Structures are given as structure tokens and as C-alpha cells.
């Protein structure tokens, strides 16, 4: 009997990064305000969903991990997403939160957001329309 899987992509349902939370309740509120929908997995784990994408927020924090963790999010309308972030005024209401206005890189338009735990989120609109990293 072989343990070989001929097409691993057909049996994987999701890949969800696990992010740290310095103050679990603060991070939970932050992500809900940003637009994520929480789904409790247990007392110390919450799946945060946004459309078809999600990550797991964990009630655990290691500064070195958080400070070196980055999420890369491809969007179709960075201007609209940036307007949404700006309207929330997150840096004024959450300690440690910082934003980086959209800048043009050679491969796309990029904006940044650092969450209350120090995790960097990079929101990107690729230069080539329709190129959101999906295989052709």
C-alpha cells in the first residue's frame, strides 16, 4: 500500500498562518474593526476570516516572532482598501499600530499596516491587471 498522493493540491483545504497576539482581546477587536469575522476555535485561538481568506489569531506572543512576521495581501482596489483603513483611524486608537501610505513599486502599488502586536501587513495591487497571484 502506497502513501503517495498523486495531487496534494486536491486534498488541501486551506493554508492558514497563525499570528501572535500580544494582547489577545485588543488584537481580536483590531481585526474585527478592520473587517475580519471571528470564529472561535477555542479559548486561545480564533480563526479570522475575510472573504475566502483567513488566518488564526493565537493568544501567544513572542516579540521576535511578531517583529519578523509579515502578511502579504493581494487586493484588486488598493485605493479603496486604503480609504477603508484611513477611515478607521487605527493608529490613534491602538497602541503600536502604524500605517504606511501606498507607494509604487516596480511590481505594484503597496501599502503597509502594523498591527497591535507588531505584525506587518502589506496590501498590494499588482501592476498587471488581473495578476493576483492566481495560477493561469
Image: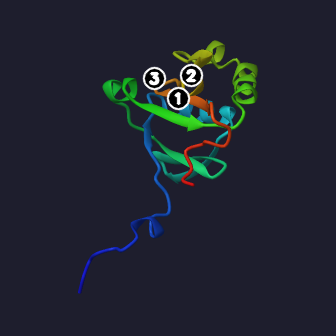
- Residue 45, compared with residue 99, is above or below; it is below
Front residue of this view, candidates 23 and 124: 124
Q: How far apart are labels 1 and 2 at the CA level?
A: 6 Å
Q: x, y (%) of residue 65? A: 34, 30
Q: Regarding mark 2 in the picture, which secondary structure is present there?
A: strand
Real-space CA distance between mark 3 and mark 2, rounded to the nearest whole angstrom: 12 Å
Q: Where is residue 47 in the image (x, y as percent from the top left)?
A: 54, 49
Residue at 68% x, 32% y: name it. Answer: 33
Query: Quick one: label 1, few (<14), some, or many (20+) residues within 10 Å?
Result: some
Q: Of helix, strand and loop, which one carries label 3?
A: loop
104 with respect to 22 (left or right): right
Name the N-terminal-most of marks 1 and 2: 2
Q: Quadrant of the C terminus?
A: bottom right
> What residue did someone put label 1 on?
121
Q: What's the residue at 55%, 45% (across, down)?
A: 133
Foreground: 108 or 72?
Answer: 108
Which residue is label 3 attached to? Answer: 118
- Mark 1 to mark 3 CA distance (whole Å): 9 Å
| Residue at 34%, 74% in the rendered image | 5
Q: Name the residue under label 2.
A: 112
Answer left or right for 36 relative to 121.
Answer: right
Instruction: From the viewer's side, name the closer residue of 117 and 87.
Output: 87
Q: Which residue is found at the position 71% from the left and 30% from the top?
A: 81
> Considering only vertical position in the picture, is 134 above or below 10?
above
Q: In which quarter of the image is residue 48?
A: top right
Q: Say if mark 1 contacts mark 2, CB within 8 Å.
A: yes
Q: Which quadrant: the N terminus?
A: bottom left
Discs 3, 2 touching: Cβ within 8 Å: no
Amino acid at each position: 500500500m502506497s502513501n503517495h498522493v498523486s495531487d496534494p493540491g486536491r486534498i488541501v483545504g486551506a493554508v492558514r498562518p497563525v499570528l501572535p497576539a500580544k494582547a489577545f482581546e485588543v488584537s481580536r477587536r483590531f481585526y474585527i474593526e478592520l473587517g475580519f469575522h471571528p470564529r472561535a476555535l477555542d479559548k486561545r485561538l480564533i480563526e479570522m476570516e475575510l472573504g475566502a481568506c483567513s488566518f488564526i489569531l493565537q493568544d501567544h506572543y513572542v516579540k521576535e516572532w511578531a517583529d519578523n512576521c509579515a502578511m502579504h495581501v493581494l487586493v484588486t482596489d488598493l485605493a479603496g482598501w486604503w480609504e477603508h483603513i484611513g477611515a478607521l483611524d487605527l493608529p490613534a486608537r491602538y497602541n503600536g499600530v502604524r500605517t504606511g501610505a501606498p507607494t509604487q513599486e516596480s511590481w505594484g502599488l503597496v501599502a503597509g499596516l502594523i498591527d497591535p502586536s507588531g505584525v506587518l501587513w502589506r496590501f498590494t495591487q499588482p501592476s498587471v491587471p488581473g495578476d493576483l497571484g492566481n495560477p493561469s
